[in-house]
Amino acid sequence: MKALHRIAGLALLGLLALTTPAAFAQTPAQGIAAVVNDQIVTLFDLEQRIAVAIGSAGLRDSADLRNRLRPQVLRTLIDETLQIAEARRLNLSITTANVEDAKRVIETRNNIPRGGLATFLAGQGLNEQSVLRQIRAELSWNRVVQAVLVPQVKVSEQEIDAEMARLAQSNGKFRYLLSEIFLPAETTQRDADLRAQAQRLGDDIRGGAQFAAVARQFSRGSSAFAGGDIGWVMEEQMAPELANVVRTLNVGAVSAPINAGGGYYVLQVRDKRQIGVSDPNETKLHLKQIALPLPPTAPAAEVARTEARAQSIAGTVRGCEQMDSMIREVGNPQSGDLGTVRVGDLPERFRGAVANIEIGRVSEQVRSDFGVHVFMVCQRDVAAAELPTRAEAAQTIGQQRLDAIERRHMRDLRRNANIDIRVR
């Protein structure tokens, strides 16, 4: 089985999504937000993390947003305090060098000059120590997962055999590429409040925030480190409450809150495929194109003339040799032989026009910012339908098992801790 790895997600990789510094300029908060065993989470820590979370997730800062995020962010800080303490208990120390390496990664991903993270944060009105606390928490928990939890995951060859047999009998069924945000239920929080938090996060994403960034900052599931990515999943591998919703979602859609597994989920379907059925996006086409220039602001008469010419080409040109002749006649650099192109790599507006047209026939015309396009497929290579490999099956089983172990471990840490929340 391929080794399971949990690389710290570094939720701060999206720092450049932060809004202007003025949005975060606030008087430093004084006082205690929570006490976790013998560790203090200050109000200053809380307000600074809210600022980072809002900016990294691409949300619009406001007093109302801060107020509604405060309970969720505080719970995240409490979890991080427990994770750091657990790493310390297990003698899994995080060195200064580890933190510096993580800072370099953030700088590289955000085009910040080497060693310039502190200056960048100061320019955003953020306290560097609050940001480093989050980095240290992520690195600490990653150590715990790798050293203690991953070794507990065992997947036998018999289990892989059974999974492969089940997949072989699942031709035509769908697999879904999913991302999740998970908010666990707690005895100290009303169900209605938790559902409302999940609903608002979903609304923020539908309003333009990036799902992965929101998941990194607000999800408390094990997939938060990976921006909520849980990979390819079949309906049978999901809780019924989740499967019933997922099968109704279009690709790209974000679900309403789903009550399942001891909390609320918000799911996004990033892709879906039928088992044993070739993926249309993997089909390769040898394409030729005629592009007729037409400005977006062209008058109606010019639009009509250009579309009529495209229609005439579609009605008269047959075969790739005639297409070549017409390309030479049109004589602009945007027209020509596009070579072999994977359908999934084409702009979405062009995919429908070329996916199923007969070889040697001109496609329906498609409008772009440049003008009017028509295409011809000269060769089509359909990708062979393949089942997931044994390695993929083993990885799926193992990752699901690791996620369950990780959630149970975090639940036990919370249950055994003395947590005193001072703000509401």
Image (spheres, rainbow, N blue to C red):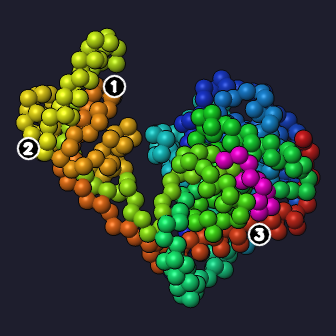
- Whether tag 1 and tag 3 are in contact, CB under 8 A, the answer is no
Q: Which mark is residue 408?
A: 3
Give the distance between the C-alpha atoms of the residues marked 2 and 1, in whole angstroms: 28 Å
10 Å neighbourhood of mark 3: few (<14), some, or many (≥20)? few
Across and down, in percent, residue 114 comes to 46, 43
Residue 280 vs 33, above or below: the answer is below
- Give the left or right position of residue 395, taking residue 301 as reference: right
Query: Which callout, 1 or 3, points to the residue nearer the camera?
Result: 1
Question: Magenta stretch?
Answer: 255-265
Mark 1 / mark 3, whichever is N-terminal: 1
Across and down, in percent, residue 63 comes to 77, 27
Q: Which residue is mark 2?
A: 321
Residue 222 vs 397, above or below: the answer is above
Mark 3 / mark 2, whichever is N-terminal: 2
Q: Amino acid at mark 1?
A: Asp
Mark 3 lies on a secondary structure that is: helix
